[in-house]
Amino acid sequence: NAGVTQTPKFRILKIGQSMTLQCTQDMNHNYMYWYRQDPGMGLKLIYYSVGAGITDKGEVPNGYNVSRSTTEDFPLRLELAAPSQTSVYFCASSYSMKGAGQPQHFGDGTRLSIL
Amino acid sequence: KNQVEQSPQSLIILEGKNCTLQCNYTVSPFSNLRWYKQDTGRGPVSLTIMTFSENTKSNGRYTATLDADTKQSSLHITASQLSDSASYICVVRGMTSGGSYIPTFGRGTSLIVHP
């Protein structure tokens, strides 16, 4: 069981370039999330999705876009990359967001540098 | 604004010793609190979950406590091992005005266990 798989693991972009961070999960989770983790800071929620075709903004959505066409996949799009988007990006999934819920299962992250 | 504060920021202990990590939160209304372990270069992994009615919960050498009145939680690690070296993240779920439960992440405590 692969869990949550993120690709690529590392990437260097030039300012103004665009790219898509891929995330796929094989646990049939309906909820998926994108976070960024900056050095010494807590994870910040970028976008989340409660099911295929439904997405919503998190705490820091500016400069990013997402789509959820299938239950398994939740890609994150960076348009016009900026140095402030240099970070480690984590994708996560869970069965539910409500109540005691289930734990979020995280991928191993994509380390992105914008130069 | 929902906030989760963790202390200490970093901690160095000798193998075999015990340690306690602290988490204070202002998330309201409170749903649950999780402790995650994040190894270097990996995504966070859930250690334990605390709900409003629970005071103490153990998972092997890890024991979490929750005081919902003072909005404090602790994670106690007994007989530390080298593999305990990691970042420990406190995550509190609260309900948004839209009825969703969004997690708020602490910055984590970096624990280093020396032989």
Image: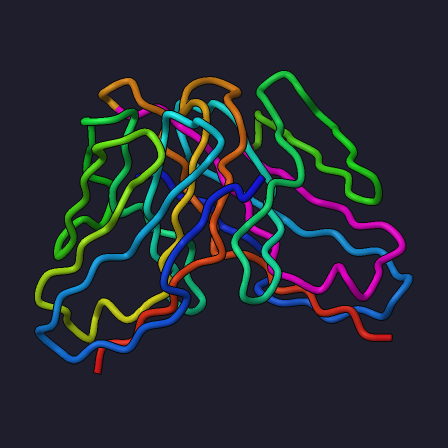
Along the viewing direction, whichever of A85 and B62 lies nearer the viewer: A85
What residue span does the magenta drawing correspond to? B71-96
Taking the image as shown, residue B31 lies to the left or right of residue A50, namely right
Taking the image as shown, residue A42 lies to the left or right of residue A68, namely right
The answer to which image quadrant residue B98 occupies is top left
Q: Is residue B81 magenta?
A: yes
Check the image and report above or below for B1 versus A96: below
Render colour scheme? rainbow
User: How far from the left and from the top, in percent, is residue A39?
Assistant: 42, 69
User: How far from the left and from the top, in percent, is residue A71?
Assistant: 32, 29
The N terminus of chain A lies in quadrant? top right
Name of the residue lying farthest toward the bottom: A115
* Residue visible at 43% across and 27% down in the picture: A29
Question: Magenta: predominant secondary structure element?
Answer: strand
Check the image and report above or below for B82 versus A13: above
Q: How many discs mark residues in the rendered view?
A: 0
The answer to which image quadrant residue A16 occupies is bottom left
The answer to which image quadrant residue B114 occupies is bottom right
Check the image and report above or below for B7 versus B96: below
Taking the image as shown, residue A87 lies to the left or right of residue B43, namely left
Along the viewing direction, whichever of A30 and B68 lies nearer the viewer: A30
* Residue visible at 21% across and 83% down in the picture: A115
